[in-house]
């Protein structure tokens, strides 16, 4: 802070975007009831002192504090709006009343995600509640301007002194005052926070009285017992909570009227003018009542049952030199590395924003703000001065910060450790010249617990044969989930920060992963372990029997033969599919070739991968889907136009109009494989027959140019309602149709497949989705076969129903092929088809599931594992 006889400069307490106080969505702040000032929409997670001063007020709920400068100016920092309702959750105070602070000193840390879920806004006002003879110069920063932490924000100028002695001639002059007292009990649920404190001051001024509050029975050593309504900070520093007994004293001609207004304010429960949004429940919160002791909930990404020791999987950090070459060398190295990572985060944020991935953009922004935290840089700088290399100094500084957050015991703060570790890794990678570190060791049969995994990490850890996988983040349709299903690796996702806390509290302890009912039992009883062990052993025998018959056709009890194919991501999984007894490949996701690269793969690279997949299947049909990019899958080298809703934007078949070169190269690569008779090409996200016709014309032109006599089959995916309803016209153009149930469910029910809060409701067994599948089969009948390549094909309940609806082929993850074939051999498809009118007339998916479960239980003499699992769930 600049402090002279003429001006005071206040610095930005956090990096953020400028919000004029009049634009703050709260009438107390916007109406300047507390005083003049400015607000910031924060991009960081720590508030710093805007000036030198003394802390004179700290709210009991940690959301607000007041500083007083040596010049007598009082400044209120109010973290977010309606944050008082959070009762301090997600906020860690770093100072107390009476502390002296310097400009830039940290005042409190906060969990922006937690506050955003529980408060009406993160907008943080900085208000001059007591000007003390100074006046605010008109702020020069425009609305929306971005300011850095410590950047000049406001300037106060010395005003012409006004005589304060005149007060003695006013209503407060001794002997000429009306005085009245009143005792009452505070009814405000959130206590006496900034908003009611400002209203009390306004009441006193409106009635021309002096108003004093005395807290009767105050027993907190940190709280004052008396305060004048003229000082908002003094009022808040009383520490008054709901039920506190107060004595109000008013002096002035309108004392009684002022007390009437004050009493009405303090004894009437505060209405929520800006109610906080209802937080979205995590699986653990949503299923809290159904969870047993020591259980955590998650979303099933890959089904199965597993028992083993819990191991917290932490990828090794990049190797960096332990000792440095001196401060003059290491400090610039660290600064340059921080700058590079900051630039990368800014690019990631911009790309996510452009693509409409708001949540990802906010995460990148938060990481960028934390990276710029001067406290972290200062802590690393101390270690550099102690002889450490730049990378090692950063590692130790962030280790210490992670330990501090964990030691608070606050789950919200501890949850930020994963973000801190990500920053630690990224900066150390910039300072490392060593090769990629080896994976950490863990025992075979372990239950791996991690915040997140990349697809490449999943492939690497799966090779070491863990029993199962639990992720704090992730989604059921992510690439990691797809890879886990392909390997038959039980996996739960979206389990939340409680998962990491639980495994760190009991490392190596045996646990039960029930990836069918969505449960992880962290400390199961011996009896439960014995029961699950017996079930796993029984399933092992069933699986062995299914594998023994996996190469036989799947023929239902009423004589229908159904092809069971595999969904794969490349040649390696094609070999898994062949070994599992798949009748072919129902979906090869070619986008795996395009992801995690700096540029698109060339024709030769693509042809080699496609040819290897065909060779692995030994003459069985292989369906390869052309590039399906957009929505949740983005390429860094492919600039798609911004769209308010990327799921409804340029993706799938629509991509070829703007990027024909990608389709051209892919079609040439596909036409280069042999034998072409076993190759089937599938176009994603088709909404009308004309899109398929255009690709067929281009395919014919290239084949003629290459002098080819054979042609691959060309088909379309049914993923949108328009395609299902127009299946007859598509079937007239296509050689086959394949239903993508994941997207068809999303678009039919208007529920984002990537939203964990909606996953349980986005159910393929909803009657509306089933009717569209029925319409597809009816439209294609007699024209072309219909398959299903979505997750529903491998679902124990949905698969039999799909066959009853008339589907000719199911494509599942390779590990599921033997089990699906075995289940179909037990099915009487004609008998189930007779139940379709009643099933499709039900109200919702849960009703269909209940009726279908009961029907299968009655008709399956052997009572399948699926049925017992569903009953237990």
Image: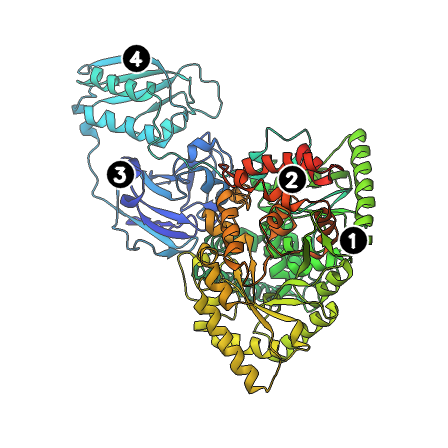
Q: Tag count in the figure?
A: 4
Which one is in front, 480 or 418?
Answer: 480
- Residue 736: x and y in percent read 57, 64
> Crowding at label 3, few (<14), some or many (≥20) Cα neighbours within 10 Å?
some
- Mark 3 or mark 2: whose residue is earlier in sequence: 3
Q: Marks 3 and 2: which is nearer the front?
A: 2
Q: Tell me the quadrant of the picture where the C terminus can be found.
A: top right
- Mark 1 or mark 3: whose residue is earlier in sequence: 3
- Residue 592: x and y in percent read 61, 65
Distance from disc 4 to disc 3, alpha carbons, whole Å, reads: 28 Å
Q: Tell me the element at label 4.
A: strand
Q: Marks 2 and 1: which is nearer the front?
A: 2
Q: Are marks 2 and 1 in contact (CB under 8 Å)?
A: no
Give the quarter of the image for residue 171.
top left
Residue 465's disc number: 1
Which one is in front, 193 or 647?
Answer: 647
Distance from disc 3 to disc 2, alpha carbons, whole Å, reads: 51 Å
According to the image, label 4 marks what residue?
182
According to the image, label 2 marks what residue?
518
């Amino acid at each position: 802070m600049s402090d002279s006889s003429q001006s005071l400069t206040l610095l930005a307490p956090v990096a953020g975007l400028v919000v004029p106080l009049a634009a703050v969505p709260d009438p107390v702040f916007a109406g300047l009831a507390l005083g003049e000032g400015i607000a910031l929409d924060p991009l960081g997670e720590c508030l710093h002192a805007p000036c030198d001063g003394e802390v004179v007020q700290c709210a009991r709920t940690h959301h607000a504090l007041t500083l007083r400068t040596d010049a007598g100016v009082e400044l209120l920092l109010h973290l977010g709006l309606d944050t008082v309702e959070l009762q301090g959750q997600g906020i860690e105070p770093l100072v107390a009343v009476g502390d002296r602070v310097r400009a830039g000193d940290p005042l409190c840390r906060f969990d922006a995600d937690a506050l955003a879920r529980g408060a009406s806004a993160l907008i943080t006002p900085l208000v001059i509640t007591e000007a003390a003879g100074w006046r605010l110069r008109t702020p020069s920063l425009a609305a929306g301007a971005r300011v850095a932490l410590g950047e000049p924000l406001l300037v106060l100028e010395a005003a012409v002194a006004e005589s304060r002695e005149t007060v003695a001639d006013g209503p407060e002059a001794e002997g000429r005052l009306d005085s009245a007292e009143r005792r009452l009990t505070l009814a405000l649920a959130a206590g006496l926070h900034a908003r009611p404190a400002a209203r009390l001051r306004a009441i006193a001024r409106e009635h021309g009285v002096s108003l004093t509050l005395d807290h009767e029975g105050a027993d907190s050593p940190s709280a004052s017992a008396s305060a004048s309504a003229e000082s908002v900070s003094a009022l808040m520093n009383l520490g008054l909570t709901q039920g506190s007994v107060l004595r109000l004293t008013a002096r002035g001609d309108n004392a009684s009227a002022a007390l009437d207004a004050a009493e009405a304010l303090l004894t009437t429960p505060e209405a929520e003018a800006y109610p906080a949004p209802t937080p979205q429940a995590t699986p653990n919160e949503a299923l809290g009542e159904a969870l047993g002791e020591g259980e955590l909930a998650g979303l099933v990404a890959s089904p199965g049952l597993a028992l083993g020791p819990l191991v917290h999987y932490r990828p090794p950090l990049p190797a960096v030199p332990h000792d440095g070459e001196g401060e003059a060398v290491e400090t610039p190295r660290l600064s340059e590395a921080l700058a590079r990572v900051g630039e990368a985060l800014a690019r990631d944020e911009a790309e996510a924003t452009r693509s409409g991935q708001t949540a990802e953009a906010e995460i990148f922004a938060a990481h960028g703000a934390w990276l710029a935290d001067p406290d972290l840089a200062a802590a690393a700088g101390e270690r550099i001065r102690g002889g450490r290399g730049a990378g090692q100094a950063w590692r130790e500084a962030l280790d210490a910060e992670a330990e501090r957050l964990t030691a608070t015991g606050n789950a919200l703060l501890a949850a930020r450790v994963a973000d801190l570790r990500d920053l630690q890794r990224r900066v150390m990678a910039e300072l490392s010249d060593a090769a990629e570190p080896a994976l950490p060791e863990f025992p075979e049969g372990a239950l791996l617990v991690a915040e997140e995994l990349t697809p490449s990490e999943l492939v690497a850890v799966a090779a070491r044969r863990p029993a199962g996988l639990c992720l704090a983040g992730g989604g059921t349709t992510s690439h990691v989930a797809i890879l886990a299903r392909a390997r038959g690796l039980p996996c739960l996702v979206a389990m939340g920060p409680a998962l990491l806390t639980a495994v760190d509290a009991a490392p190596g302890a045996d646990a039960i992963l029930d990836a069918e009912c969505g449960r992880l039992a962290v400390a199961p009883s011996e009896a439960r372990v014995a029961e699950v062990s017996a079930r796993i052993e029984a399933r092992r025998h069933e699986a062995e029997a299914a594998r023994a018959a996996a190469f036989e056709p799947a023929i239902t009890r009423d004589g229908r033969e159904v092809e069971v194919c595999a969904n794969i991501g490349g040649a390696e999984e094609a070999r898994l599919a062949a070994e599992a007894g798949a009748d072919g490949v129902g979906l090869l996701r070619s986008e795996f070739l395009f992801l995690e690269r700096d540029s698109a793969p060339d024709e030769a690279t693509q042809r080699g991968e496609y040819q290897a997949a065909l060779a692995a299947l030994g003459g069985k049909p292989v369906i390869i889907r052309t590039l399906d990019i957009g929505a949740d899958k983005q390429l860094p080298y492919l600039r798609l136009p911004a769209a308010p809703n990327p799921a409804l934007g340029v993706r799938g078949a629509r991509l070829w109009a703007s990027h024909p070169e990608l389709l051209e190269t892919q079609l040439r690569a596909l036409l280069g494989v042999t034998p072409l008779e076993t190759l089937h090409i599938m176009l994603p996200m088709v909404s009308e027959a004309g899109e398929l016709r255009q690709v067929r014309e281009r395919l014919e032109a290239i084949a003629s140019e290459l002098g080819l006599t054979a042609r691959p089959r060309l088909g379309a995916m049914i993923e949108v309602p328009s395609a299902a309803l127009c299946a007859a016209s598509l079937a007239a153009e296509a050689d086959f149709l394949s239903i993508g149930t994941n997207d068809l469910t999303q678009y039919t029910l208007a529920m984002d497949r990537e939203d964990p809060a909606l996953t349980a409701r986005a159910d393929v067994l909803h009657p509306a989705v089933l009717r569209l599948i029925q319409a597809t089969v009816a439209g294609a009948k007699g024209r072309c076969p219909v398959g299903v390549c979505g997750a529903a094909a491998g679902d124990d309940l949905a698969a039999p129903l799909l066959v009853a609806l008339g589907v000719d082929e199911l494509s599942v993850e390779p590990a599921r092929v033997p089990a699906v074939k075995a289940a179909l051999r037990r099915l009487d498809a004609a008998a189930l088809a007779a139940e379709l009118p009643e099933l499709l007339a039900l109200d919702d998916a849960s009703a269909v599931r209940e009726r279908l479960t009961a029907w299968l239980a009655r008709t399956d003499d052997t009572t399948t594992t699926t049925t017992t699992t569903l009953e237990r769930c």
